[in-house]
Amino acid sequence: MTEQEKRILTIIEEMTLDEKVAQLVQLAPPFFEGAANEGQITGPMAAIKVNKEVVRNSGSVLGTSGAREVIHIQRTHLKNNRLGIPLLFMADVIHGYRTIFPVPLAIGCSWDLELAEKSAEIAAKEAAISGVHVTFAPMVDLVRDPRWGRVVESTGEDPYLNSQFARAFVRGFQGENLQNDFDRVAACVKHFAAYGAPEGGRDYNTVNMSERQLRESYLPAYKAAIDEGCEMVMTSFNTVDGIPATGNRWLMRDLLRDEWNFDGVLISDWGAVKEMIPHGVAEDEREAAYKAIQAGVDIEMMSACYIHHLKELVESGWVDETLIDEAVFRILRLKQKLGLFEHPYRGADEKREKEIILCEEHRQAARELATKSCVLLKNEGVLPLNRDKKIALIGPFAQSGDILGPWSCLGSKDEAIPLYDGFKMKVDPSLLLVAKGCDIETTTEKQWQEALDIAREADVIVLALGEHSDMSGEAGCRADIRLPRVQLELISELKQFNKSLIAVLFNGRPLDLHGVVDQVDAVLEAWYPGTEGGAAIADLLFGDANPSGKLTMSFPYSVGQIPVYYNCFNTGRPKDAPDAQERYVSQYLDIPNEPLFPFGFGLSYTTFSYSEVVLSSDYMTPDQPLSISVNVTNTGKVAGEEVVQLYVRDIAGEVVRPVKELKGFQKVFLQPGETKKVTFTLTEEQLRYYHSDLQFTSDAGTFVAYIGPNSRDVMALTFKLVK
Ligand code: GLC
């Protein structure tokens, strides 16, 4: 035990039971004396009755920031707290604090781990100088259902890719040493676990799956974040095998703490302790408190079960006080790791706020990542745009600042660059016409006519369409994932002008793009591109940057296909089998099995060719990895980046194995005519999987390696694992 940890034990010995219990309580700013604002409310504000004593002894605050505000609350708290224990300040700094980066689903499509890490580092810096100590990020929930609104916060459907991004975000947020580097914040990986798999894609709904599937697909990214040193874990709202995560002792004690050796702080999600009552595993708040503390939840966020019942549970012998001491110890140790005992105001600094927040360097980083995160889904020779042509920019997002996404912390729509402003950086205003044509879901005769008038006058029509940012995000689920009808009608009306039609999409989920991709000449998926969104998209549309984004989530052909994901099972009657029958195969009568756009898909303004794939051998062993190489050539006229992807299939496992699994990727930048050799090294560890007895091992046997620009258009080579 370190000297610092011994000091914590000394503090705990001096604490009364009331003080210990209050340390496990997290409250919103309004509870604190002199708080200037109510902070960010991101959940149901239940009436929480706590007395002044509890506030004086509480352990943390969520949802507030700003150096002046944090210093004021902290100073007041330290005056009132008997032992001078500082507060932890936590906030949802998901993809930017005030300089907002693209939403995580977009960042995932960049396949750029360095830029992802950089975005988290910048977010941490702006947050830390504004007094934030912990961010409730990264969200690493794997998602295969775009109806679920929080897909926008994820990096998609692949366990390996999500794990890589989880690590990058934790590194960016936390850096190397939180005690000395006050420009970083502690990260909190969420939502543990499998929150991204609710039945029907409906938020907070039941999650039901085998432990094997949980371990194989849904847990790896949380484990990656923890292995990268993530200081905190947040419980999820959903059940895991019939028990709400927040009271699930197997999940939180056996797996998270014992098997994974996580010894950091475990915080509930908003009100999730009390929600064990409506879930139906607790009769009242007392039982909810009992189950949560037994599961090892250290901090109760925004409900008061702990504060109302833990003391009595200890005094009546239901809960051993050592469980409370453990939780207090972990919380105080995190405060110590952040240097808060010696520096309770840590990085909070009004002067630096003014100098650093939204500085040009940060905006440029956001612009670069946004250009890498957009995905070119279609281009029938109409992009890049010609700067001498008259352009009509039409749609609800033409001049909208609603391009930050639903979790944009202190990001302001007024500080965002709308698409129209981005266009004005590129072309003479006399060549640029703009009209809304419609709002997100409605239109007026005037709006409609204005759009038709400028379309008539223009050479090229660029449509800026999509979902309002509150149509995704928490509790933002949709059963119909098409663009709103009025926008589809606008497309078909404008198509009648027989002019080049380009659609730029601002949305928080994979959409059913029928009525869009079949109607227009080009589609750029921009997601919510962040503060510099309009500038980044203009860079791409006018060719000052070349699209390189690749989808990290399948775009369904229709909502009826969901869940549709690339790493699926083959079934016993695959439709594409050589001897497949007409009828008795796994298929729909009315739509294809394949998604509209597959995982890993994205176009460029140039083209790339792949040489024959070469294997170092036709077999590998645990001691002899396999080298897999391919030459990639830029066969077009402009420089561009390609994401070369390696997938593997285990032809016959002890349990069914996916038809493909991403095992590696490399981004290569190529000048026109340039060729680069791309080599992957595949190890036996990468072929391991959970067997029916949950052993994580590999089997000797036959495998197929696939290489290509996406999960569909691949070259295959067979090899064996010999053991
Ligand atoms: C919300 C979200 C969670 C967020 C927390 C604090 O309900 O589920 O992701 O971090 O509350 O705002």
Image (tube, grey):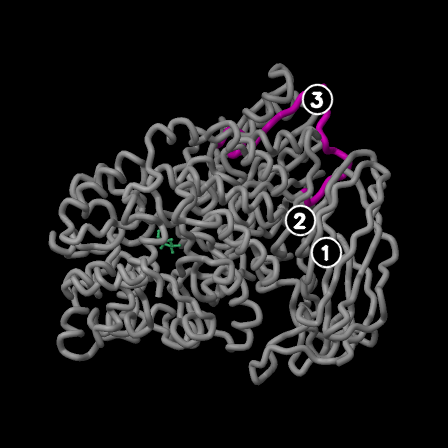
> In what element is the residue under mark 1?
strand
Q: Which mark is residue 550?
A: 2
Q: Amino acid at mark 3?
A: Arg
Q: Is residue 502 left or right of residue 563?
A: right
In reply to whether residue 391 is colored magenta, the answer given is yes
* Displayed-image quarter of ligand 1: bottom left
**Is 502 in front, or is 703?**
703
Q: CA distance from mark 2 to mark 3?
A: 27 Å
408 or 172, which lies in front?
Answer: 172
- Badge 2 marks a residue whose secondary structure is loop
Q: CA distance from mark 3 to mark 1?
A: 34 Å
Identity of the residue furthest to the bottom in this view: 693
CA distance separating discs 1 and 2: 10 Å
Q: Which mark is residue 387?
A: 3
Which SS class for mark 3? loop
Place of residue 228 in the rendered image (x, y in percent of width and height, measured from the top left): 51, 58
The numbered mark, 3 or 1, whose residue comes first in the sequence reads: 3
Residue drawn at point x = 19 percent, y = 50 percent: 84
The one of 300 and 85 positioned closer to us in this rendering: 85
**From the image, which quarter does the C terminus lie in?**
bottom right
